[in-house]
Amino acid sequence: MASSKAAPAKAGPARAPHYQRVADELIQRIATGRYPVGAFLPTEMELCRQFSISRHTVRESLRRLRDAGLVSRRRRVGTEVVARTPPARYRQPTNSIADLLQYAEETRIAVLEARRVHCSVPLAELLECGVGDAWLRVKSVRASPGGDALPVCMTTAYVDARLPDIEPRVRRLTGPLSALLEREYGLRIARIEQSIQAVRLGKRQAALLRADEGSPALRAIRRYYDEGGALVELSNAVHPADRFTYVTSLIRG
């Protein structure tokens, strides 16, 4: 493993934390080939000495490199450089229903929770149903394909709990929830309403998304309607801002 004395970390923004300045310096070294793809970074203790920082600061700096997709860390092996530049963030075209459904097909989903809930007054208004109606609340995390890919969003979705065997089917879900509704229940998504707003990640959201608490994010609330105009699914998806881009083309009629 490389171990050479180095100059202090390059100064970043005036108020940037020390771990961020060290991460920026390591990113620069990787980009310029000082640590090429396939090479290992210096050990934690070597980095502590090089930058005159604590082991906790080193680990936070390396976590940022890992989250950027630049390194892979393995216990008792070391920190290996796996990319010279961060991979491109996910871009989602939103010009048609097919585009939205295709996005879900191109990512992988991990279901965290599927639980039956009865609607309070605010939830009934959100789901356009009666107070006390039963819906299945599904919490999941979605990521691009790849073994150690960072999550691109976390989602809380609602589907009608009266659908036969909906709970066990959802628990086995690996693809889009909307596709399951169309395939298993003969529903056809005829209309999707989407609203997007800027938010900041809360503590639990940040932990699930492997991001910083309070960092910027995009919230997309989507309502899926069948051909009769009934709401069959509502999803509330939160995307870290630096990992996701919406792309829309508008054409004059």
Image (tube, rainbow, N blue to C red):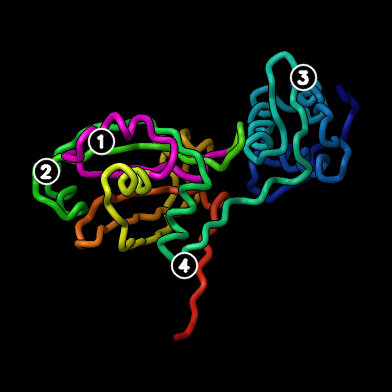
Q: Quadrant of residue 138?
A: top left
Work out how far the residue at label 1 is from the one at label 3, CA to CA, in angstroms: 52 Å
Mark 1 or mark 2, which is nearer to you? Answer: 1
Instruction: Answer whether residue 18 is visible to the viewer in this image.
Output: no
Mark sitting earlier along the chain (2/3): 3
Where's the C terminus, which quadrant? bottom left
Mark sitting earlier along the chain (1/2): 2
Work out how far the residue at label 4 is from the one at label 1, CA to CA, in angstroms: 30 Å
Q: Which residue is located at x 70 percent, y 29 percent?
A: 72
Q: Give the label on residue 133, or none.
A: 2
Q: Nearer the viewer, residue 185 or 41?
A: 185
Give the class, few, some or many, for how many residues have Cα within 10 Å of label 4's Cα (few <14, many ≥20).
few
Residue 80 lies within the magenta run: no
Mark sitting earlier along the chain (1/3): 3
Q: Quadrant of residue 81?
A: top right
The amino acid beneath tag 3 is Met
Give the class, few, some or many, for how many residues have Cα within 10 Å of label 1's Cα (few <14, many ≥20).
some
Q: Left or right: where does residue 12 sit relative to residue 60?
A: right
Mark 4 or mark 2, which is nearer to you? Answer: 4
The residue that label 4 is drawn on is 95
The amino acid beneath tag 4 is Asn
Q: Secondary structure at mark 3?
A: helix
Q: Secondary structure at mark 2?
A: loop
Q: Position of residue 179 (x, y in %)?
A: 37, 47
Q: Of all residues shown, which one is farthest toward the top?
A: 76
The residue that label 3 is drawn on is 45
Q: Give the label on residue 166, or none.
A: 1
